[in-house]
Image (spheres, rainbow, N blue to C red):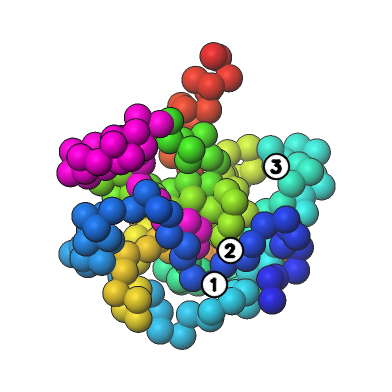
Amino acid sequence: MPPKNWPQSLPYLTNPAYSPTLTSSHLTVLRARPQETKDLPPNNPKGPSPLVKITPITTPSHPANGQSGLFATKDLKPGTFILQYIGEIHASPLSKTSASTSTSPEANSQSQKADPHASSNYDLSLDREMGIGIDADKRGNEARFINDYRGVAERPNAEFKEIWDGARKERGMGVWVLPEGKSGKGKGIRKGEEILVSYGRGFWGARKGEEED
């Protein structure tokens, strides 16, 4: 069952979906554990997380007013794993493998197409060199509702960090409460507080460019 306030028009995922753009080379990279990657906690629930809730935002000054955000249902200590960011794992049509390792007309045609995920507001990069990302625009889980801190708070209280799913033997992305030691920013998240991350300069730079165009 999807969590409360989940959009009826979107499929709710408990495991990642896979795009046909992924080649065998992409899958090899996806299933090779990088060094110093944290494990996905084995007790992570397959389904709605008890630590968060999707809440409509009605504050006029909030940048996401009229949309929704993700809020903590209990106090979360610094460094706590909150939930996995789940969506469609895909590869850019212009990534190295799709452009150079494939010689079929179909693959070459695909590599010339515009990236359908390029304008998504829900696409996270998992491996930049290989062009692998996780897009929760069309389907995903609660993590897609996490907003940027700008215009809401002075600083983020959570962050995206890569994880290793030991059960699936696969790389992924998780959401963590900022640790205490990160420039003193980790204060934890209080019950009822919105979970906020930094989307990064690249995200806002791209959106600014689109507006100017």
Question: What whole-number distance in Å separates the C-alpha atoms at marks 2 and 3?
Answer: 18 Å
Tell me the residue that label 2 is attached to. Answer: 141
The structure residue drawn at horizontal position 75% and vertical position 60%, both measured from the top left corner, is 8
Q: Position of residue 156 (x, y in %)?
A: 51, 50
Question: What whole-number distance in Å separates the C-alpha atoms at marks 3 and 1?
Answer: 25 Å
Tell me the residue that label 1 is attached to. Answer: 14
Q: Helix, strand, or loop for circle 3? A: loop
Q: Position of residue 141 (x, y in %)?
A: 58, 63
Sequence order check, earlier mark of 3 and 1: 1
- Quadrant (top left/top right/bottom left/bottom right) for the N terminus: bottom right
Q: Nearer the viewer, mark 2 or mark 3?
A: 2
Sequence order check, earlier mark of 2 and 3: 3
Q: Residues within 10 Å of mark 2 (few under 14, many from 20)?
A: many
Q: Position of residue 63 (x, y in %)?
A: 68, 38
- Quadrant (top left/top right/bottom left/bottom right) for the C terminus: top right
Q: Helix, strand, or loop for circle 2? A: loop
Residue 95 is covered by the magenta coloring: yes
